[in-house]
Image: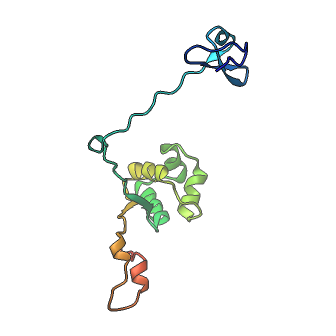
Amino acid sequence: MRCEICGKKIMGKPMKTKIESSTMLTCNECSKFGKIQREPPKSRKRSPARKKPRFEEPSQEILEDYSQVIRQAREKNGWSREDLAERIYEKASVITRLESGKMMPDIKLARKLERILNIKLIEKIEDIKSEDLEPSVQRGATIGDIARIKRN
């Protein structure tokens, strides 16, 4: 192999050198004209016994009647919308939109509201198992086989 800058025959391993925006294979002498690019360390494959178990976080969703729950808890504490907004570091317009149902809180905002108002807005959803989705052998599939029925 020859150096891409001077053309000399390279003895040993060529240096991967970045000169301006080009990466070239150079000899040791020409590598001083740019920045030597180091190869990332090769990843070692882990044996199956050393694998760390992955834990899936249960899915979460906001309650359907979140707007009423927020408003009732705020009124119970005797706070105005501005007071609540100040306590959770949000704008009063956010509280207005939440209570009117025009805006659904994300998980982070819902957690702040839960903590400040001492309420429950987030519910955990258990993963549906594949055998729960399979229709019964004796009858055809029903909507209940497909949809998760919500109970209050």
In the displayed image of the protein, which residue is found farthest to the left?
49
Q: Is residue 142 left or right of residue 94?
A: left
Q: Nearer the viewer, residue 26 or 94?
A: 26
Residue 72 position within the rendered picture, expressed as x and y whole percent measured from the top left: 44, 62
Q: Residue at x 33, y 85 (%)?
A: 136
Position of the C terminus, as image quadrant, is: bottom left
**Count of numbered marks:** 0
> At 34% from the left edge and 75% from the top edge, which residue is drawn?
132
Judged left or right of residue 1, residue 49 is: left
Image spot of residue 22 (x, y percent): 71, 24
**Whether residue 15 is visible:** yes
Q: Residue 138: percent from the left, percent from the top?
A: 32, 91
Q: Nearer the viewer, residue 43 or 91?
A: 43
Residue under the point 49% across and 50% down: 109
Query: Residue 60 lies in what quarter of the image?
Result: bottom left
Q: Quadrant of the N terminus?
A: top right
Q: How is the image coloured?
A: rainbow
Is 72 left, or right, of 31 in this rendering? left
Residue 14, image x, y percentages: 59, 18
Q: Is residue 121 visible?
A: no
Decide which of 39, 56 is in the foreground and name it.
Answer: 39
Residue drawn at x 28%, y 40% is: 50
Image quarter of residue 130: bottom left
